[in-house]
Image (cartoon, rainbow, N blue to C red):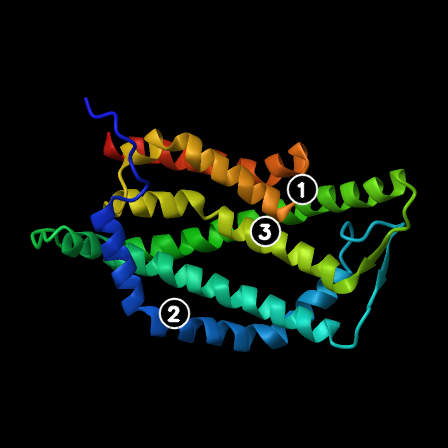
Amino acid sequence: MDNRPRDLIPMAEFVGLVNYLKGRLTLLIGIFLIGMTLGYPFSEDVINWLLNTDGYLPSEVTIIILQPMEVILLRLRISVQIGFILVFIAIITDLTWNGRKIISNARRNKSDSNNLKISKLIIVLISIVGLGITGGFYSHEILIPMLLEFLANDATNVGLSNTWQLQSWIGFIVGLFFGSIVSFQTPLVALILLRTGIISRRIITDNRGIIWFIAILLGAALSPPDPLSMVLVGGPIIILLEIALFCDKIIRD
């Protein structure tokens, strides 16, 4: 019995995937620039919405601006994140359409054909939007209000004044939104990788502990380093991955 550690993506498949994405680099850069260009004017509406949204600004907190360029830098940051989201969607869609072909070429197996139907691609696009909305709703209703209240109460408990910088405050909120929208794509990404053969189910299950640890690290990077915050951010990734594995088992059976 083979007890050797298994990589999340086998070397041949990994090399094939990397080479394919290199070939798509110019297209992905173009999509990113389009997202930034369209996102910059939209970022002003995002900032105004956040400033007027209940639950995002505790009553005892005062927002200040420290430098004239702060709003411009904040808008650039939001537009960059919008660009990354569009690139992420493009990669998922591309892997859905060409994943089997990529792995077939990597394995030197020309017999595998890409028989994906347009209807399946439409389902994937609808799933991306639906999971993104679900992630945004989770962030809006649970994650952001709870973490901001935690930060405000923590400062009050130690006798500090609650004065928050505009760029840090909105940047923190937008980062959580961005992280939630992307992390809630976990089941879709996992199913695509499994169904196209880029990774196998056994590889995920053998490395489940590593994946859970990475999810918790992501939670620590996007939130205050307390156990509750890490669970609120990293927990959904773990749960959604397990849902993806369950759905994959049902499909295979």
Name the residue carrying label 2. Answer: 28
Q: Closer to the N terminus: mark 1 or mark 2?
A: 2
Residue nearer the viewer, 175 or 195: 175
Mark 3, residue position: 136
Mark 1, mark 2: which one is toward the viewer? 2
From the image, tell me which residue sits under label 1: 142
Residue 115 visible, this angle? no
Circle 1 Cα neighbour tier, 10 Å, few/some/many (<14 / 14–19 / ≥20): few
Please rate how many residues cluster around mark 3, counting C-alpha atoms within 10 Å: few if below 14, some from 14 to 19, many from 20: many
Which SS class for mark 1? helix
Q: Secondary structure at mark 3?
A: helix
Asked whether residue 31 appears in the rendered view, the answer is yes
Relative image position of residue 67 (x, y in whole percent): 79, 73
Residue pictured at 26% horizontal, 58% vertical: 97
Mark 1 residue type = Ile
Q: Which residue shows up at 73% across the image and 59% down it?
A: 168
Which callout, 2 or 3, points at the residue further toward the start of the chain?
2
Quarter of the rendering occupied by the N terminus:
top left
> Please, what is the three-letter code of the amino acid marked with disc 2?
Leu
Answer above or below: position of 100 versus 166: above
